[in-house]
Image (cartoon, rainbow, N blue to C red):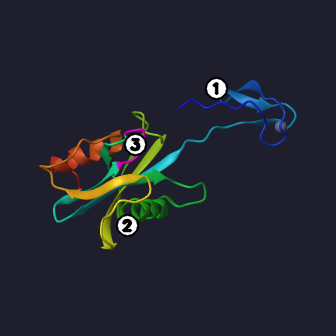
Amino acid sequence: MSRIARYCALCGRPLSERILGGRERPYCAACKQPVYFDPKVAVVVFIEQDDKVLLIQRAVDPGQGFWALPAGFVDHDEAPEAAAVRETLEETGLVVRIDKLLAVYPKRDDGLADIVIAYSATVISGEAKAGDDAADAGWFTREDLPPLVFYPSITLTNKWRAGALVL
Ligand SMILES: [Zn+2]
């Protein structure tokens, strides 16, 4: 997603452009401050139980109606593991324990995050039921996977189906 800044967040004056670190960046001449656009970071959680994977059906675009692993953005002051636990609870009603870092993905499609951190997790308590921006939540075997969306969910689930995902 391209980013635009027209006014300085510190003083409100219009920004100019300046080459810094090899690329053009918005710059406030009054504050002598460049604007650095930080990547949006998301977490995605792979939860297997009884040879089934937990998926949520997306209630909103992008990907409305398709299925994906529980996921969401990391708050600016939040640990990624804490965000993974929080998002899983919000979307599925399940309390989980994070087990392992599985992968870090760059942006590859129209998913909203620039960087996606994937964890495996184990259910501690609760029953799967949809919440937040999920229309549905459920457990799926390797043979009955629904249509998936977003590179991290598709990649991890395909690896799992092939028996190549070490959780
Ligand atoms: Zn300024």
* Depth order, front residue of 12/120: 12
Residue 10 x, y percent position in the rendering:
81, 43
Q: Which residue is mark 1?
A: 22
Q: Choose mark 3 or mark 1, whichever is in front.
A: 3
**Magenta span main SS:** loop
Badge 1 density bin: few <14, some 14–19, many ≥20, Cα 10 Å: few
Give the residue type that dot 2 points to.
Gly
Q: Quadrant of the C terminus?
A: bottom left
The reply to whether dot 1 and dot 2 touch (C-beta < 8 Å) is no
Which element type, helix, strand or loop, lies under badge 2?
loop
Q: Secondary structure at mark 3?
A: strand
- Estimate how packed mark 3 is, as few (under 14), some (14 to 19) or many (20 or more) residues with alpha carbons within 10 Å: some
| Amino acid tagged 3 | Tyr
Q: Who comes first in sequence, dot 3 or dot 1?
A: 1
Relative to 81, say whether 109 is above or below.
Answer: above
Amino acid type indicated by mark 1: Gly
What's the CA distance linking mark 3 and mark 1? 24 Å
Q: Which residue is mark 2?
A: 93
Q: Which mark is residue 105?
A: 3
Left or right: residue 46 compared with residue 34: left
Q: Which residues are magenta?
A: 58-63
Asked if residue 11 lies left or right of residue 84, the reply is right
Picture quadrant of ligand 1: top right
Q: Which residue is at the far right? A: 30
Q: Is residue 153 magenta?
A: no
Looking at the rendered structure, which numbered label has been put on residue 107?
none
